[in-house]
Amino acid sequence: MTNATRIDRVNILLVDDQPSKLLTYETILGGLGEHLIKASSATEALECLLKHDIAVVLVDVCMPDFDGYELAGMIRQHPRFQQTSIIFVSAILMTDLDRIRGYECGAVDYVPVPVVPEILRAKVSVFAELYRKTRDLERLNLELEQRVTERTAALEATTVTLQEADRRKDEFLAMVAHELRNPLAPIRTAAQLLRVKELDESHRARARDIIERQVDHLVCLIDDLLDVSRITRGVITLRREPVLLGAVVARAVESMRHAIDTRRHELRVELPDELIAVEGDKTRLVQVIGNLLHNAAKFTDDGGRVVLKVGREGRYATIGVKDTGIGISRELLPKVFDLFTRVHASSDPGEGGLGIGLALVRRLTEMHGGTVTAHSDGVGLGAEFIVRLPLVATHTIPMEPSSDTNPLPLMAARRIVVADDNHDSADVLATLLGLHGHDVRVAHDGIEVLAIAETFKPHVVLLDLGMPKMDGYETARQTRQRPWGKDATLIALTGWGQQQDRQRTAEAGFDAHLVKPVTDSDLFHLLATTKVSKG
């Protein structure tokens, strides 16, 4: 198949002082469908180059006026011919120095004489196509430059919006620091109280409760931040199942009861007589309603009223949360679901939050095929948020599991190595395990783990992943190569908990993957499943 009918033919310049050779090259290359131009000298070749755009120059090395090397050098010096490919034809045996000289002059290839037609056609065809593609790219670049020019004006019009987004991000980072410090202050104070020997048991219990409550708050804060990242990158997965909205509401109210009671709000929950069900992820739906209740409680003065109402509108279930709080200004109302927008931006920074709660509500609701809207008559007049979700039939709804806290399981003592470069984390976890009767050793890097385990022969190794000297992944791989490590249970303890992180630990030889902070219930129930050897 030839390209004779193509309209984007390129020019190929054939340069040789012998007419018979030019005729031979023309015969060989005629089937390519390109435009062939002949020149019998270097001077004539230069004239042709100035008149035409040349894709490929096929030039004899030895010519009478000046040779192919000099011609190639002059071609390469001209900015117009930077995309032109130069192929030397030589009837004499070329040494390595000759070839190096040719490449330095600008040649891209050599063809020896006698010429093999198939080889010559292939070489010229490749460089002709390269020239064609390069010109296509140049045209595309010109088009892109034109588009960039046309869009610059439009982009300039969005400068104010971008500046506002940058301001909100800066404010968000400041709020993150503020929100993280808030729970850390009572945690530090409670920890200092626990050092006082004369402290009675009631105050010790209260200090422990404060630490636990504030750690839970930190975990929720970090989970919200991670959720924003996961949803933005599209890596979050919903565990869909038919769920009764009444059960979801009950869990959300329970999770927010402390925040509502602390502000002495009146909470009224209005559920219909009929059962209403939707298909969705129960945990995420609880998060949606909980975030709305949390906002209502936070932005309503003490002693206010919050109403949570469930109903139906056609094919949709509705969940409304209405408060008597500070309300939302008309200017802010269209932006309340945008990331980093703080509903209470004019108030004390400590009450403003991170500006991610309502963004999560919208994105999680949309992932369920629903919508969420906000309404307020203005500042000081309260606000109402309504979530709409597609209804499903109420049959085959799974039974709600018991909410009773599972007691820690009874188990035989294990030999356990706890490895973490954070000395406090390692020591406190080792103390907890020791108090429950386990024999525990502590290490702070992977090399230390392997050294301890050679004689200790642990049943379980709890490994942080980001340790110095040897990280948790390599430690796990080397553990599996030791006789004592083949049957040991390896548990990853890490702040990384996405699917790719779990897959990576599994590939390294871990049996389980726990995300920090780990509850004692999760840890001890996992330990109860591990095997205990008699060795």
Image: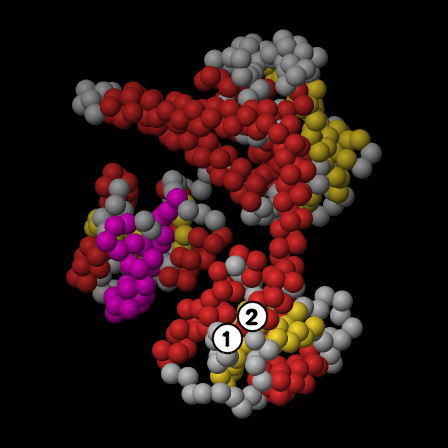
Q: Position of residue 118 (x, y in %)?
A: 60, 86
The reply to whether the magenta stretch includes residue 461 is: no
Q: For this view, does 191 lie left or right of residue 281?
A: left
- Do the residues bearing badges 2 and 1 touch, measured as CB atoms within 8 Å? yes
Label 1 sits on what residue type? Answer: Asp
Mark 2 vs mark 1, CA separation in Å: 8 Å
| SS assignment at label 1 | loop
Q: Residue at coordinates 53% horizontally, 43% vertically from top-left?
A: 230
Q: Is residue 474 magenta?
A: yes
Residue 48 appearing in the image: yes
Q: Residue at x 41, y 77 (%)?
A: 99
- Residues rendered magenta in the picture: 467-495
Find disc 1 in the rendering and name its residue: 65
Q: Is residue 213 above or below residue 442?
A: above
Q: Label for residue 87? A: none
* Residue holding disc 2: 43
